Each structure stands twice: as C-alpha cells, then as structure tokens.
Image (cartoon, helix red, strand yellow):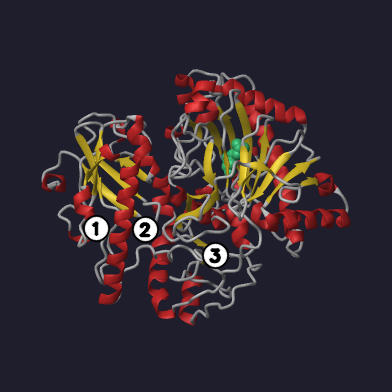
C-alpha cells in the first residue's frame, strides 16, 4: 500500500507517472524528474537502539523516536542494534559464496522447486513495478521455520491452525550443503534479526500506547522471511545502456523490514512530494522500514513508504533484509497473501497459485488498536452464531469490505482452508444487505478508482451492467499493458478489436487473451469471469497448455500474475505447481490461475491440451 496515491490524471510538469502494484491494484504516483538527493536526518533519522535493552523510561524514549520516524517516512537507521558484526559478515560471506556459484548450481535450489517462492531467484525474473525495468538482482529466500526459532518451540505442540501456514522448506538447505557455512550463517543471522524484531515490536506497542507485550502472543509463529539480495556489478557500458533497476518500486508487506546493506548504496525512498531520496549506507546500522501491515494496523498513521534499489554500480552489491514479523501466521498471512497476490511476480514470498486458493477473501482480524473505525458493523445473532460455529470470537467488531472505501481489509479471523467456502458465502451474503461503509481513510488520498469486489455476483441488471462496463475498461487497460510489455505476444484480441468504440469483452467470441507462447502454441485465458446474475460459479474454459519454459514467456506471464499448474507433474519441467510444461506432448492437462494486477478479481482456468472439444479449437 503506497502511502499516498495520486489519481490517474496527467502528471504536472517535471513529474512522471510511476505505477505501483498494491493491494488495491495498480496505483499511480507522480514522481519528480529531479535526480535523487541525500535524505535529511529528519527524514530518515539515525536512532540509537541500545535503549531497546534499557529500562522502561529508555524504552519509552526509543518508542517516541521510532513513532516520529514511523509517522514521517517510516524509515530510520538503527545504530547500536546489538547484532554482532561477526554474524553479519558471516552471512554476507555466505551470500557471496552462494551467488558466486555457477548458474546451474544455483538453479538446484531454484524457487521453482518451492511451494512458497523459497530458494534461488535468478536475475531478471521479477519486475516489482510495471513501468520500471526488470529487477537486476538475484536473491535467495527462506521463510520462518519453528525448528530454527531462537525462542525455542516444542515442535510437537504447534497449534493445528498454525501448521498450514508454516512455510519453511528443506530443499534449499539440502541443495546448499556444499556451500561452506551457508545454512549455519544464514540461520544465525536470521535468528539474530528475528530476536531484534521481536524486541522492536514491543517498542512499537509502547509507541502505540499499548501494553508493551500487546503483540507478544501474536508473534509466536511469525512470518519472517530471510532474504539475501545480490545486485551484480555492471560494466560501465552496461550501466550506461541499462534500463534495469535493482529492485523496482514497492512497499514491504509485513510489520517491518530490518535491512542490512553493504556500503555500495542504491536504496532510495520516495517522499510524499514524489522526490526520490537516498537511504545511503551508514556503517554499523540497519535500515528499518515500516511495512504495509503495520500501516494498516495503525490506520495509516505509520507509513509504509515506497522504496527501490536503483543500482548502476560497477561493483557487486549485497543486502540482507528480514521482513518480519507478521502476526501469528493464521491471522497475518492471509493479509500478507491478499496483498501479495497483487504484487504478482514480485518475490515477496508467496507462490501465486497457492494464493489463488488461500487468499480468496483477504480476511484478517484487525487488532483492537483499530480505533478510528468510525462505523462498525453490528452483526446479527445469526451472524455471530455463524462465527462461533467457525470457532471464532463472538463479540468482536467486524469490518466488511466496502465498495467505496479505500480500505481493503475485511475483518474476520480466518479459519483455515476448510471453511473458506463458508467464509466466502458469508461475505457474499452479508455484504449487500448491510452495505457497511467505512470512512476510515485517515491519511489516505482517494484512489484512482474504487476497488472492485472480488467474485461478487451482481444482484440487479444495473449492477451487472456496471460490472461489465468496469470489466471492459479494465480489460482494455490490461490489454494495453500486455502490448506495452511485448506486442508480439498478444495474439488476441487484436488492437482493432479492443479499440472499437463498442468493444465489449464479454461478447467476444473468445473472451480471452491469447498469448503467443514459444512459437506456435498459445495460452489463452480470459481475465474475468463475466458476471451472470445469481450465478456464482466461475466459468471454465479450455486452451492448450504452453509447452515452453522460455524465460521471456516466463517473465511476461509472471509479470501479469499467470501461473500454470500441471496436473501431470511427471511431465512438468519443474515438478512444481507453478511450473511450465516441458514441451512434452504428454503434458495434457494444466491448470492456470490468473490474477490481473489491476483489480481485485482472481480466476482459475482449466487449460487443457489436445482434448476433444477444447474451446481452443473455436479460437
Ligand atoms: O536491497 C535493498 O537495499 C532493499 C531491498 C528491498 O527493498 C526488499 O528486499 O524489499
Ligand atoms: Fe523492500
């Protein structure tokens, strides 16, 4: 969630539009064309963290400083953070040893083997911002695993509702055993960062006038993503010619990020005025920034600010962020996932095909510090009974998503995959009747357009018409973006078709986008289910599975949130859910999920190959 968003009008002189993927879809920011300048200390202050271990008065002093910084840009430097240089340098060395390996070796722990985006992310496979270059960065990522939690956990007593959300995996540790001290150094660094984060969250609680231990029960099994970032050096010629970016403009998702960066520089932060400022390295410090989730919890009082790495360095750069902690996984991850599904291929840690099934309704419980909700939903007894039957608290305040509030989040404790359907039904049914609108927009500028509600069947002919109009518009916009990305790859609809004034996506013979995929094959899908009154089922349609794993297609698809899922894993190059088929004719059946970045809709597709009656034949 970007902290301020301008409407999608023309930019004023001296400014250009920056597109950001957010939980609300694409939003635009006007960004000054002035070159980045150094940050002022008041913008990104240097804070002495030694007080984190001090007495209450000292912790309160620290809390006050952090609060100020959090309310300003949400970025600060942490000095005297207590993590030993030896631990940091060991991790830094481990990163170098890992990235120095051959591509082939690194691919042995490729994220394609992961169910959750863990492992190695090769260069050029992500593009955080749609209108910046490709991310010129390699990364290695791992997620929270209670086995390594520095607060020791009884592995036999992990609550059942937490288990499905644990996303540590073993393959990336197995596949890096030959890299000297790799796992050990990574885990040690991660543990130290997590310990510091847990302390920091207590300071956050103090700063929010909450009991210091307020969040403690919620950080027992936190999301805590360890990442090693490697920004390879460019030659001077490459640097001069490059359109790439280190990591495109984005906000982080969780409570906060603790970032160690080396002394090369490149991290930039976007001020509310649209000026890039440099968060230049300061020896011995971490950069800490507030994430979307904490921004949400504080009703936007604390800022999750857009940042990026702009790197044309002729020397390698390394950084090591820990994005953490989220609240207890079962509460937090839903939110995290809901956000990430719109970040598409950005490597924040979730595989979008998992999201397709788990983040459908973006439900999260808002802790009660959410005091600025000006109207709350009074649930009926029947609703409360329903909640209770799902094992939920009966007397909480619930927000429902509203169609014209800028708030995304609905409030409802998730109840695992099983009850997802129930929850969906609940919200579908609940929403129109109650029409709960939350004017909870403090600190947030209006969005370019209200977020569309996902999977909501229209109730009336007017609603249907309205939805179709919106879909036509968004379809055209989506088509434009595909074309911008790589015209040769969009086979259908044609430019003439979408530019017709009476263009109606829902009436096209083939309601999809056909993308050339590796020569003669095409992947066709449509970005929306066209709404039918009182028909809630998504439309399925068929198309041949793509049979290539060529990188350009991967990028194109990844960027727009396509995922493919073969049901015939034997014939899938990656063997993973997000894999591409390997060109074998035997990969007969594939499933694809599609999440257009600009709206709140999510689709599943059946993509079938060589199957009689395939609608691909019609096309
Ligand atoms: O490498 C950096 O300095 C920043 C990385 C970053 O923003 C991220 O991983 O979210
Ligand atoms: Fe970041």
Earlier along the polypeptide chain: callout 2 or callout 1? 1
Is 427 displayed left or right of 528 in the figure? right
Relative vertical location of residue 235 with respect to residue 19 in this rendering, above or below? above
Instruction: Assess whether mark 3 and mark 2 are in contact (beta carbons under 8 angstroms).
Output: no
Category of crowding for the residue at label 2, using alpha-carbon neighbours closer than 10 angstroms: few (below 14), some (14–19), many (at least 20): many
Q: For this view, does 121 lie left or right of residue 88?
A: left
Q: Nearer the viewer, residue 374 or 128?
A: 128
Q: Which mark is residue 445?
A: 3
Q: Nearer the viewer, residue 482 or 56?
A: 482
Q: Tell me which residue sits at (26%, 35%) in the image.
A: 517
Q: Give the side of residue 499 with respect to residue 208, left or right.
A: left
**Residue shown at the point (24%, 37%) measured from the top left:** 516
Which residue does the image show at 60% across and 41% down from the upper left?
A: 35
Looking at marks 2 and 3 on the same chain, the residue that comes earlier in the sequence is marked by 3
> In the rendering, which numbered label is found on residue 601?
2
Which of the marked residues, 1 or 3, is nearer the chain's N terminus?
A: 3
The residue to which callout 1 is attached is 539
Real-space CA distance between mark 1 and mark 3, rounded to the nearest whole angstrom: 36 Å
Look at 51% across and 42% down and name the residue there.
349
Element on which disc 1 rests: loop
Element under disc 2 = loop
The answer to whether residue 511 is visible is: no
The one nearer the camera, 557 or 185, is: 557
Name of the residue lying farthest toward the front:
13
Disc 3 is placed on an element classified as loop
* Percent x, y of residue 137: 52, 31
């Amino acid at each position: 969630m970007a902290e301020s968003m301008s409407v999608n009008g023309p930019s004023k002189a001296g400014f250009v539009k920056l597109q950001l993927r957010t939980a609300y879809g694409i939003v635009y920011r006007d960004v000054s064309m002035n070159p980045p300048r150094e940050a002022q200390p008041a913008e990104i202050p240097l804070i002495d963290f030694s007080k984190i271990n001090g007495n209450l008065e000292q912790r309160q002093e620290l809390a006050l400083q952090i609060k100020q910084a959090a309310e300003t840009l949400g970025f600060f430097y942490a000095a005297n953070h207590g993590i030993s240089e030896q631990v940091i340098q060991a991790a830094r060395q481990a990163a170098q040893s890992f990235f120095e390996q051959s591509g082939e070796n690194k691919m042995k722990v490729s994220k394609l083997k992961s169910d959750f985006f863990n492992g190695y992310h090769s260069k050029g496979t992500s593009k955080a911002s749609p209108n910046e270059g490709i991310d010129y960065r390699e990364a290695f990522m791992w997620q929270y695993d209670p086995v390594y939690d520095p607060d020791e956990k009884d592995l036999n007593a992990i609550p059942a509702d937490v288990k499905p959300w644990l996303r540590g995996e073993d393959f990336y540790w197995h596949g890096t055993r030959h890299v000297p001290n790799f796992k050990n150094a990574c885990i040690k660094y991660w543990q130290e960062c997590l310990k510091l984060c847990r302390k920091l969250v207590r300071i956050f609680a103090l700063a929010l006038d909450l009991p210091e231990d307020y969040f403690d029960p919620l950080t027992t099994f936190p999301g805590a993503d360890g990442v090693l970032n490697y920004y390879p050096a460019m030659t001077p010629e490459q640097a001069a010619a490059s359109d790439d970016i280190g990591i495109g403009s984005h906000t982080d998702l969780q409570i906060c990020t603790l970032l160690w960066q080396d002394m090369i520089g490149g991290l930039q932060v976007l001020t509310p005025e649209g000026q890039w400022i440099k968060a230049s390295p300061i020896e011995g410090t971490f950069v800490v920034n507030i994430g979307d989730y904490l921004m949400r919890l504080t009703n936007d009082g604390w800022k999750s600010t857009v940042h990026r790495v702009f790197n044309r360095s002729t020397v390698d750069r390394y950084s090591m962020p820990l994005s953490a902690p989220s609240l207890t996984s079962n509460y937090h991850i839903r939110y995290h996932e809901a956000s990430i599904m719109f970040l598409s291929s950005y490597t924040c840690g979730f595989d979008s095909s998992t999201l397709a099934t788990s983040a459908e309704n973006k439900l999260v419980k808002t802790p009660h510090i959410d005091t600025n909700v000006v109207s709350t939903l009074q649930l009926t007894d029947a609703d409360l009974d329903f909640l209770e039957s799902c094992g939920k608290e009966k007397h909480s305040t619930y927000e429902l998503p509203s169609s014209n509030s800028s708030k995304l989040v609905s409030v409802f404790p998730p109840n695992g995959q099983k009850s997802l359907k129930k929850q969906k039904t609940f919200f579908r049914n609940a929403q129109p009747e109650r029409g709960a609108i939350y004017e909870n927009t403090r600190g947030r500028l209006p969005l370019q357009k209200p977020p569309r509600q996902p999977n909501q069947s229209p109730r009336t002919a007017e609603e249907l018409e309205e939805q179709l109009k919106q879909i036509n518009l968004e379809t055209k916009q989506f088509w434009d973006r595909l074309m911008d990305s790589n015209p040769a790859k969009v086979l259908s609809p044609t430019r003439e078709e979408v530019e017709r004034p009476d263009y109606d996506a829902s009436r096209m013979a083939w309601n999809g986008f056909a993308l050339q995929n590796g020569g003669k094959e095409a992947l066709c899908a449509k970005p929306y289910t066209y709404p039918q009154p009182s028909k809630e089922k998504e439309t399925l349609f068929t198309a041949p599975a793509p049979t290539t794993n060529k990188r350009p297609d991967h990028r194109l698809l990844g960027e727009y949130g396509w995922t493919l899922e073969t049901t015939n894993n034997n014939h899938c190059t990656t063997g993973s859910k997000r894999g591409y088929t390997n060109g074998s004719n035997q990969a007969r059946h594939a499933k694809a999920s599609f999440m257009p970045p600009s709206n709140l809709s999510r689709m599943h597709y059946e993509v079938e190959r060589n199957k009689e009656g395939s609608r691909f034949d019609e096309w």
